[in-house]
Image: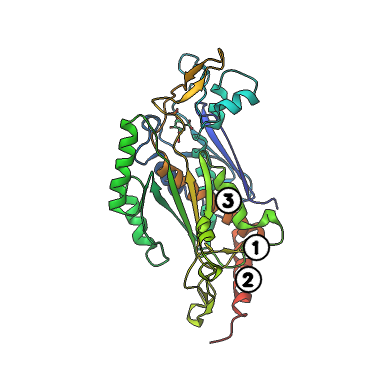
Amino acid sequence: MPQLDYQTAGESHGPAGIATVTGMPAGVLVDEDFINAELRRRQGGYGRGGRQRIETDRIEILSGVRLGKTIGAPVTMLVRNKDSRLDDLQRTPPVTRPRPGHADLAGSIKWLTTDCRETLERASARETAARTAACALGNCLLRELGIESFGFTRQIGEVATGAIVSPENRAELRSLRDQSDTYCPDPGATERQRDVIRRAKIEKDTAGGILECHIFDCPPGVGSSMDWRTKLDARIAYAVMSIQAFKAVEIGLGVACADRPGSQVHDPIAFDPSQRNTPSLGFVRPSNNAGGTEGGMTNGMPIVVRGTMKPISTLLRGLPSVNLESLQPEDSQYERSDVCAVSAAGVVMEHVVAFEVARAILDKFGGDSLTELRSNYERYLEAARKLAPKS
Ligand code: EPS
């Protein structure tokens, strides 16, 4: 059975984005309403540009699904672009003044051209529509096992929420997040984040931020310390860093680990027999600085990931650049863009992280069908519970 994996294809102004997910076992409910709702959420967030008024992203399933469930064959999904004009030279003219921070300059040199158009079409975050669809399908697998993801905006510009996320308050925070147009579970911070974006817009500038994702109810031992490629934290970091405009990834306490002695970083271990039937199997921790992973494996605590997105590199006011045809200094070219896409990136990140967990779950438990996967999963939990003393 091939490893769970996905690929995406499609240019920003091409006809469609295509997502192909391979290695999904048969029998997984493909919750189209859930996937489409997440695609809608990805289109939203305060600070998005005109493109989102044109598009209505939704999946069309082309293969691998029968009667609403996977059949074990590759699942192909298509997200159509209404704004499709790749071959229209009037509406997608050459771009010869690269935007600092974008793929424009490196790509035009790489593909040996002075026109950055094809690079920007390839590199565009429009690809994240298809990627969200692919990864939300991976999330459907997690949902079958009772594993839940929760992603939100931690910070936009300098405005961060101090919200503390826990298994107990996740439903309340999810509802607060869904009422916020910056996807931040904190009404006060939402208002100030809107101000940051409003100010950036007035100044013809852009805003970045920090996204956070928690994965709840994943059992211990998922991922592996045996090979660097199978370490779950490393896989998650790779996947998150690959999202357009991301510049940093942290797990748990992340970079703040450096400021503290070991005694204030490592999460003490205790055993509580009453928690034996929870994902922690009873091994409870008063803190979760490790962000749910130790040695590249889950430890039963929620997985906590943060990603930093830089401000979008397309500025209405331009930035100092060079015209690739004349090699003379000129400001970068403006292409229709977003002032801030941090909130949307949080949706992408949530599902990208969930997909990596789903992949690691399938690596460990395998199975051609959900029934087989479930039975392997439950047998493991049963054996692991036997390690703890009987209460
Ligand atoms: C993007 C530029 C903008 C964004 C786009 C990413 O596209 P356009 O130039 O078509 O307005 O809106 O993101 C999306 C289209 C999307 O669906 O997220 C870029 O340069 O990366």
Residue at (42, 42) in percent of width and height: 342
Q: How far apart are marks 1 and 3 (CA)?
A: 22 Å
- Which residue is denoted by mark 1 in the rendering? 365
Q: Is mark 3 on a helix, strand or loop?
A: helix
User: Which percent across, then down, holds residue 244?
Assistant: 52, 38
**What crowding class fits label 2: few (fewer than 14 Cα within 10 Å), some (14-19), or many (20 or more)?**
some
User: Which percent across, then down, holds residue 41?
Assistant: 40, 44
Residue at (53, 47) in percent of width and height: 248
- State the residue in front, 308 or 44: 308
Residue 333 vs residue 180: left or right? Answer: right
CB atoms of marks 1 and 2 within 8 Å = yes
- Which residue is denoted by mark 2 in the rendering? 380
User: Which percent across, then down, holds residue 190?
Assistant: 31, 48
Amino acid carrying label 1: it is: Phe
Q: Does the residue labelled 1 lie within 8 Å of ligand 1?
A: no
**What crowding class fits label 3: few (fewer than 14 Cα within 10 Å), some (14-19), or many (20 or more)?**
some
Disc 3 or disc 2, which is closer to the eye? Answer: 3
Amino acid carrying label 2: it is: Tyr
Indicate whether 139 appears above or below 309.
below
- State the residue in front, 102 or 368: 102
Q: Is mark 1 on a helix, strand or loop?
A: helix
- Which residue is denoted by mark 3 in the rendering? 237
Amino acid carrying label 3: it is: Ala
